[in-house]
Image (tube, rainbow, N blue to C red):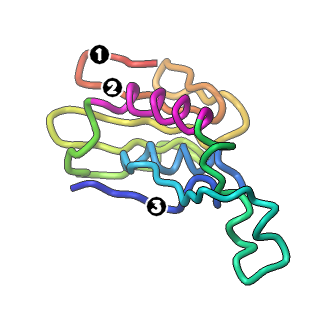
Amino acid sequence: VRYSGQAVNFSGGSENLWLRMAAVAADPYYVLTNQYGEQVRDSDYSFLYCSDYNYLKNDILEDVKEYQQKLSGVSGRRLIDYIKLSDDLYRSVFEDGYTVTVNFSNEDVSYENRVYSAKSYQVEKTGEVTP
């Protein structure tokens, strides 16, 4: 089952959005137009101010490529469990032995003799770690 959430370019705080997406292996999506954002300012379509494909394309390609590389083994797998490990540290368990551990904190978090970097996620398959 494939998931998607809020449009990345409309999220306002995309760092936390990427973390939330990683927690459930959601596919990123964007709302894009072929219009310069200033052309819609002060119109009924002003909400599209951040949708200019030509302006966003390099960032989109870079961000999505990195995200897909990290989550390639998890994408499309069934989410089995979502576990709160500590205040800001969560682990998603997927079929076939994959887990995604997400640290939503602004600080590094230690858990079970491991350190999870601030505002990061780590994908693992039983016995393997992908930074």
> What's the residue at 38%, 25% (across, down)?
69
Closer-to-camera residue (86/81) = 81
Q: Which residues are magenta?
A: 58-72
Compared with 79, 45 (above or below) is below
Asked whether, in this view, residue 38 is left or right of residue 36, the answer is right
Determine whether the residue tagged by mark 3 lies in a helix, strand or loop: loop
Instruction: Report the amino acid beneath label 1.
Output: Glu
Verify whether residue 40 appears in magenta. no
When asked about the image quadrant of residue 41, the answer is bottom right
Determine whether the residue tagged by mark 2 lies in a helix, strand or loop: strand
- Residue 23 is labelled as none
Verify whether residue 67 appears in magenta. yes
Q: Marks 1 and 2, Cα distance to the nearest angstrom?
A: 5 Å
Return the residue at label 2.
124
Return the residue at label 3.
5
- Answer with mark 1 or mark 3, whichever residue precedes in sequence: 3
Q: Marks 3 and 2, Cα distance to the nearest angstrom?
A: 23 Å
Return the residue at label 1.
128
Q: Marks 1 and 3, Cα distance to the nearest angstrom?
A: 28 Å
> What's the residue at 75%, 73% (across, down)?
46
- Answer with mark 3 or mark 2, whichever residue precedes in sequence: 3
Q: Residues within 10 Å of mark 2 (few under 14, many from 20)?
A: many
